[in-house]
């Protein structure tokens, strides 16, 4: 059942500290500052030999993949790409024996992701699944992979699967990096940060009431913008996706750097902006973009780092999140935005666990 919560979605949001603990359990070697991912079945030689990591998925799993791409590039300084699974299969993908392909899927049944797995296997790539549902088709066909251990996700809108996917992708990035360029000390530091994720998520969950209050200001909206840069861009995408699917508000995510290349024309007093402004690379630039939004009268909800007064004064409302590196903040800020969309949808009287037109697993194209 719903364990006392009004909706499965809220229950699953609150399960995240535990789900992430389960996803990373037994997969961290603290002393050597690396990850243990035996399900990948890759020898140390194979781990350094392949030249490119290709990540495929759809929807929320695709957004998680984007975080994975950034993390692999920045930790391991190796080529990583993420592709929407259907695009991958229909574009005569350049993929072969020098590639590791990771297919991300909560259900393990998504038709496009499964087709991408088959295509990549046909072309001779090493293919691994990052799947939640044990024994699902993608898990079986990929043959190798990492189970999320997030527990069953019943709400159609994916929440804990995303944060577990990102947690595991950080481990993948760490593993690839430690086989290449990253020092043990740096690896140890990152393992500590990853082990700290559940506690940080817990701190965000404690803001639930405050976030519910803020949500009251958004129930009449027809449109919204989400902006972020770097690691915060996939967070904007995921935040906007969640808002669309459960509240039916038209929410668009843009890289903050793209605003002035067109979308800023849409901004006025009726276009609220949700901005990822927490401390980290690119933050000052995003704060600058927020000032441009405010100059066009757009009301701004900022996700900011606790105690950051400068960012706070640039916003109409703020959700404060604990200070952490941006690759960890992808999870922390996403949890804040999950709660935000949940409360907006609840206040609008939406059918949160079963949004219109959506199914939990998309087994047709
Ligand atoms: C969003 C959502 C969908 C799924 C997508 C992929 O909340 O649930 O976007 O993420 O259909 O599903 P899986 O991960 O099962 O392959």
Image: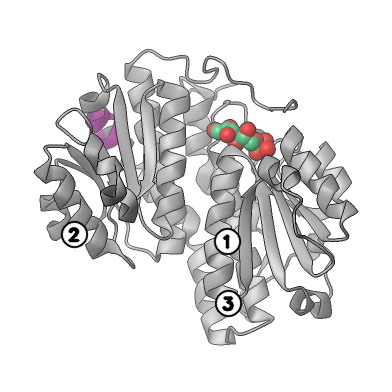
The Cα–Cα distance between marks 1 and 2, rounded to whole angstroms, is: 29 Å
Could you tell me which secondary element the residue under label 3 belongs to?
A: loop
Earlier along the polypeptide chain: callout 3 or callout 2? 3
Badges 3 and 2: C-beta atoms under 8 Å apart? no
293 in relation to 306, above or below: above
The Cα–Cα distance between marks 3 and 2, rounded to whole angstroms, is: 31 Å
Mark 1 vs mark 2: give the one in front.
Answer: 1
Give percent across and percent down for residue 165. 61, 50
Crowding around mark 3 (Cα neighbors within 10 Å: few <14, some 14 to 19, many 20+) is some
The reply, left or right, for residue 345 in relation to residue 150 is left
Earlier along the polypeptide chain: callout 1 or callout 3? 1
Residue ID for mark 3: 77
Question: Which residue shows up at 53% across the image and 20% down it?
Answer: 353
Question: Which residue shows up at 51% across the image and 30% down it?
Answer: 11
Give percent across and percent down for residue 345. 38, 22
Q: Which residues are magenta?
A: 210-215
Question: Which residue shows up at 18% across the image and 57% down it?
Answer: 288
Residue ID for mark 2: 308
Mark 3 vs mark 2: give the one in front.
Answer: 3
Crowding around mark 2 (Cα neighbors within 10 Å: few <14, some 14 to 19, many 20+) is some
Give percent across and percent down for residue 123. 87, 56
The Cα–Cα distance between marks 1 and 3, rounded to whole angstroms, is: 11 Å
Residue 57 in view here: yes
Residue 337 falls in image quadrant: top left
């Amino acid at each position: 059942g719903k364990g006392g919560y009004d909706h499965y979605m809220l229950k699953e949001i609150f399960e995240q500290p535990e789900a992430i603990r389960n996803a990373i359990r037994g997969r961290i070697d603290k002393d050597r500052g690396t990850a243990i991912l035996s399900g990948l079945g890759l020898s140390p030689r194979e781990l350094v030999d392949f030249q490119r990591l290709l990540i495929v998925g759809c929807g929320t799993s695709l957004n998680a993949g984007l975080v994975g791409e950034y993390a692999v590039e920045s930790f391991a300084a190796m080529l990583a790409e993420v592709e929407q699974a259907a695009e991958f299969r229909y574009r005569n993908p350049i993929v072969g024996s020098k590639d590791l392909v990771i297919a991300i899927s909560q259900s393990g049944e998504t038709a496009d992701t499964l087709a991408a797995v088959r295509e990549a296997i046909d072309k001779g790539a090493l293919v691994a699944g990052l799947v939640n549902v044990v024994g699902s088709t993608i898990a079986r066909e990929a043959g190798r992979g990492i189970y999320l251990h997030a527990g069953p996700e019943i709400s159609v809108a994916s929440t804990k699967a995303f944060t577990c996917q990102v947690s595991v992708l950080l481990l993948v990035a760490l593993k690839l990096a430690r086989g290449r360029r990253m020092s043990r000390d740096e690896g140890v530091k990152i393992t500590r940060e990853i082990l700290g994720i559940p506690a940080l998520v817990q701190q965000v969950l404690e803001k639930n009431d405050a976030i519910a209050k803020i949500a009251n200001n958004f129930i009449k909206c027809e449109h919204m913008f989400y902006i972020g840069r770097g690691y915060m861009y996939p967070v904007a995408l995921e935040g906007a996706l969640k808002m669309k699917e459960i509240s039916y508000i038209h929410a668009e995510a843009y890289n903050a750097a793209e605003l002035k290349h067109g979308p800023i024309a849409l901004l006025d007093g009726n276009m609220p902006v949700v901005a990822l402004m927490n401390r980290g690379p690119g933050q000052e630039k995003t704060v600058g973009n927020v000032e441009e939004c405010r100059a066009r009268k757009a009301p701004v909800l900022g996700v900011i780092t606790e105690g950051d007064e400068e960012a706070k004064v640039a916003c109409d409302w703020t959700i404060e999140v604990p200070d952490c590196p941006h690759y960890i903040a992808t999870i922390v800020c996403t949890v804040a935005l999950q709660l935000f969309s949940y409360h907006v949808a609840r206040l609008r009287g939406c059918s949160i666990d079963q949004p219109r037109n959506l199914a939990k697993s998309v087994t047709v194209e």
